[in-house]
Image (spheres, rainbow, N blue to C red):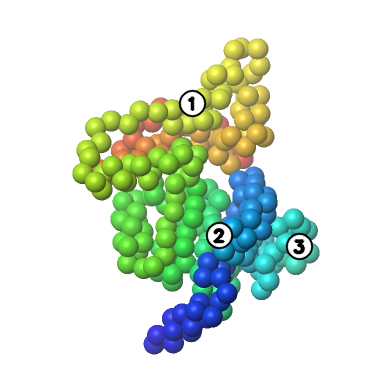
Amino acid sequence: SDMQRALRAAHSGLYLSSQTLSIGLVGAGSVGTEFLRQLDSQLSRLKQDFDVDLRVRAIATSKRMLLSDRPIDLGHWTRALETNGEPVDLERLAAHVHAEHLPHAALVDCTASDDVARQYDSWLARGIHVITPNKRANASDIDYYRRLRRSNRAVSAHYLYETTVGAALPIIQTLRDLVQTGDEISEIEGILSGTLSFLFNSFDGSRPFSALVEQARSLGYTEPDPRDDLSGMDVARKMTILAREIGLSLELRDVDLHSLVPEALQRGT
């Protein structure tokens, strides 16, 4: 029953680099594309300076995926996806990334999808590290959130989500360190939406508000659907994540929202 684990351990022991990591990216939109660009620029340095061998072996959009046994050329992945891509299948993608001959596997979720976030529990249970800026999992129902935390503690896989709040500033880890070392958090203050901050700092009446929203979306400041920002839902998710980090059993529905989006615009593309 432990044959697969034993085989993986043997392969890991034979690898020249103990830090060889098989990586899959789900969500190759604006955030995912920028992540791949930055990763491409750092691969050689990470391998040379830190003996970290990062191998992107799977890339998926909402409709298509590219699976490769060899590391994907991150300078030309879009062409390879168009030429050799196939319909997306997250189960096959996870199995491919979690290769028996590679010691470690990680899935990076750069979507804003509930469906993808619901896969985290099974990925962690299989020993796959999960790294994500997707707020949906940690702001989902409290039972699923607790299940993720239990899975994270029970297996040797990491669940990393620092970028869900604060754009990679060390907010989550700082809160966790404070709580775990006995401090009591009495209040958190902050501007929890860079999107709304940009919009209201830019709006002076000279341009329609809708034009500013369009500009913010083109610059990559908004969620894929700007209504998540304008409705306050993005801030509510961040508040829920922060509240849970300091020990509150808060549900997303407990946050009192006053949306900027008129009812007539809450549906449609």
How far apart, in angstroms, are the residues tagged by discs 3 and 2? 29 Å
Task: Give the structural element (helix, strand or loop) at label 3.
Answer: helix
Q: Nearer the viewer, mark 2 or mark 1?
A: 2
Residue 2 placement, left or right of 20: left
* Amino acid type at image mark 3: Ala
| Figure check: 214 above or below 165 | above
Q: Nearer the viewer, residue 149 or 14?
A: 14
> Residue 128 placed where, x, y %?
47, 67
* Amino acid type at image mark 2: Phe
- Circle 2 packing at 10 Å, graded few (<14), some (14-19), many (20+), is few
> Residue 124 placed where, x, y %?
42, 65
Residue matched to label 3 = 80
Residue in the image at 59% along x and 34% along y: 221
In primary-sequence order, the first of circles 2 and 1 is: 2
In primary-sequence order, the first of circles 3 and 2 is: 2
Task: Give the structural element (helix, strand or loop) at label 2.
Answer: helix
Residue 43 placement, left or right of 73: left
How far apart, in angstroms, are the residues tagged by discs 1 and 3? 41 Å
Residue matched to label 1 = 260
Instruction: State which quadrant residue 95 falls in.
Output: bottom right
Q: Nearer the viewer, residue 118 or 36?
A: 36
Residue in the image at 67% along x and 67% along y: 71
How far apart, in angstroms, are the residues tagged by discs 2 and 1? 48 Å
The quadrant in which the N terminus is found is bottom left
In primary-sequence order, the first of circles 1 and 3 is: 3
Q: Which mark is on residue 50?
A: 2
Q: Nearer the viewer, mark 3 or mark 2?
A: 2
* Amino acid type at image mark 1: Leu
